[in-house]
Image: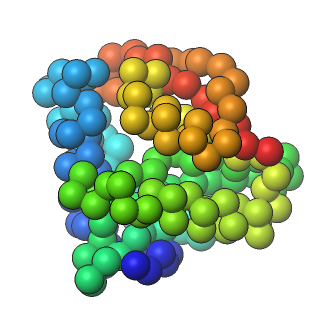
Amino acid sequence: MTIRVATEEDIDAIRHVAKASWETDYPEILTRETIEEGFNDWYAHEQIADALVPARSLLLVAERDDAVVGFAHATWSSDEGEGYILRLYVHPDYRRQNVGHELLNRTRVELAEAGVDRINAMVLAENDPGNNFYDQFGFEYVDESQTTIGGDSYRENRYVLE
């Protein structure tokens, strides 16, 4: 498996992984319409292209057999030493194969090299696998806020690793 910085050529594959993940993970949390609208908002081609700008964010992909099987998107503030893992998804067919672990490790290294000593990760409160993932890797639950998906408000947990 290879973890590398995403390129413009990866946008469709990132969208594919995100779509498969949302359709697998969120049917009990979000309506079908909300999944569709949220996916179209968050994973529009232009949104992903903006995440490719290295000065503003980090977008990594995990590749296996020349196929993108996962991705991680993070931002940071060097002035504050704070990093934010906005998204970390693994295609459902490749879960439990250390893809998420490898993406998380590489993201942590890249953020540390950017001067980050505190990493925040946000997960929908009802997304048990996502919450368990961060807990398993030593992130501590800090608080809850609201996020908007498809015009509706949902609870979101924030985890921190220092």
* Image vertical order of residue 71 relative to residue 119, above or below: below
The part of the image, by quadrant, that contains residue 71 is bottom left
Question: In this rendering, would 144 be left or right of 77?
Answer: left
Residue in the image at 40% along x and 35% along y: 129
Query: Which residue occupies the foreground of this view, 34 or 89?
Result: 89
Quick check: can you spot residue 111? yes
Seen from this angle, which residue lies furthest left? Answer: 32
* Image vertical order of residue 56 relative to residue 22, above or below: below
Query: Which residue occupies the foreground of this view, 116 or 139?
Result: 139
Name the image quarter holding the N terminus: bottom left
* Image vertical order of residue 57 relative to residue 28, above or below: below
The part of the image, by quadrant, that contains residue 78 is bottom right
Structure colour scheme:
rainbow
Seen from this angle, which residue lies furthest right? Answer: 79
Q: Position of residue 117 (x, y in %)?
A: 82, 52
Residue in the image at 65% along x and 27% along y: 141
Q: Position of residue 154 (x, y in %)?
A: 41, 17
How many numbered markers are drawn? 0
Question: In this rendering, would 14 be left or right of 34?
Answer: right
* Image vertical order of residue 26 relative to residue 56, above or below: above
Name the image quarter holding the C terminus: top right
Residue in the image at 27% along x and 83% along y: 66
Question: In this rendering, would 65 be left or right of 60?
Answer: left
Quick check: can you spot residue 37? no
Q: Position of residue 37 (x, y in %)?
A: 22, 33
